[in-house]
Structures are given as structure tokens and as C-alpha cells.
Amino acid sequence: MALQSLAALAEIRDSLLETYASNDAMNQLILSNLDPRAWRVQAPGQAGGGRTIAAIFAHLHNCRLKWLKRNAPHLKCPPPLNPHHCTRKQAAAALKRSAAQCQRMLSDVLSAVPNRRISTFSRDSWMPTWPAGGTMFAYMFAHEAHHRGQILMQAHQLGYRVLDKTPGIWQWEKLWKQAGLTTRPR
């Protein structure tokens, strides 16, 4: 492969890893600005059948753990979150730890070395296995973006408008810096 092609692939890989790092910065921003009263309230019309915001954040963390255990058992997993009892502070800390481990997993998956430790992506025992790579990243990012949307909509339906206070999830340059990245979105 030409040197120019390898450089282009490395830039794409680095951009994806940086995007995943900012992904957790978005979660942390929402968590820190969410009105505490919205944490355990059922969404309108759900009457015990839907997830609370606390349960959605726990789901994000617990899915990360499942992906780590299934695909990167060599990486240590933090403990799972109980969706019915976790606090915002516990969720923020747990998400930070699981994001760091997922970042390590994705670094291996997106590396150009031929003997990567992770070559397949298993989302769950009943789902087909995919080759590990860009699709794995896309699935993981889309899953979290979907649930962030649920969280923001549910908070809004409950009368707690998070984005009015924090339009920052759209300010990727700031998120990049908060994630400790020295580059800017490419």
C-alpha cells in the first residue's frame, strides 16, 4: 500500500478514535447539566414500562461492558451499574471508566497491524458476528447517540430542557479539548 494511502487511513483511524473520546464528553456534559429531579422520573405515558434517564445511562455503560467482555476479554471491565439504584455521580464515573476501556478496544480494532487482538465484533450472543473495524465503531457511536437523543427528549418531555443550558454537545471543538485531545475535528 502506498505511503500516502497509509497516512490517509491513519488519519481516518485517529479521527474515529477522537470522535469516540468526544462521545463520552457529550454524555458527561448531559449528566452534569441534567436537573437531578429528572433522574428517576418515568417518561409520560410509560407508567413503569419504560426506562428512566438513570436506566438509560446505566444501559449505555452496561452495553459497553458487554462489548468489552465479548470482544476484548483481556481488558478489565469496571463493575456494572444498577439501573434502579445508581446515582448521577456513579453513572458519570462508571461511564468514564468504560469509555476509556472501549477507547482501548477501538484502538486495537482500528489499528493497521495484521495481528490485532480483536478481529470480530460480537454485539450480543443472539446477534451475528461482524468483522471488527469501522462498522464496529459506527455501531457503538450510533447506539450512544440514539440513547442520548432519548435522554434529551425524555428530559424535555418532563420539563427539564437540558440543551437550553448546554448547547455544548454540538460544540465539538470544546468537546475535543475536554476529552484531552490536542487536535481539532478533522
Image (spheres, rainbow, N blue to C red):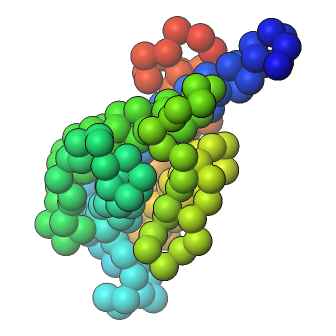
Q: Is residue 48 above or below residue 18?
A: below
Q: Nearer the viewer, residue 102 or 171?
A: 102
Residue 12 lies in quadrant = top right
Q: Residue at x 31, y 49 (%)?
A: 73
Residue 171, compared with residue 38, is above or below; it is: above
Q: Residue at x 14, y 66 (%)?
A: 85
Could you say which quadrant of the image residue 74 lies in? top left
Assign the N terminus to one quadrant of the image: top right
* Above or below for 4 versus 121: above
Asked whether the viewer can see residue 159, the reply is: no
Residue 135 appears anywhere in the view: yes
Tell me which residue sits at (21%, 60%) in the image.
81
Left or right placement of residue 153 versus residue 33 in this view: right
**Farthest front residue?**
115
Q: Nearer the viewer, residue 184 or 46?
A: 184
The correct choice, above or below, for 183 with respect to 34 in the image is: above
Task: Please state if 88 lies on the left or on the right of 121 as rendered.
Answer: left
Look at 38% across and 58% down and name the residue there: 70
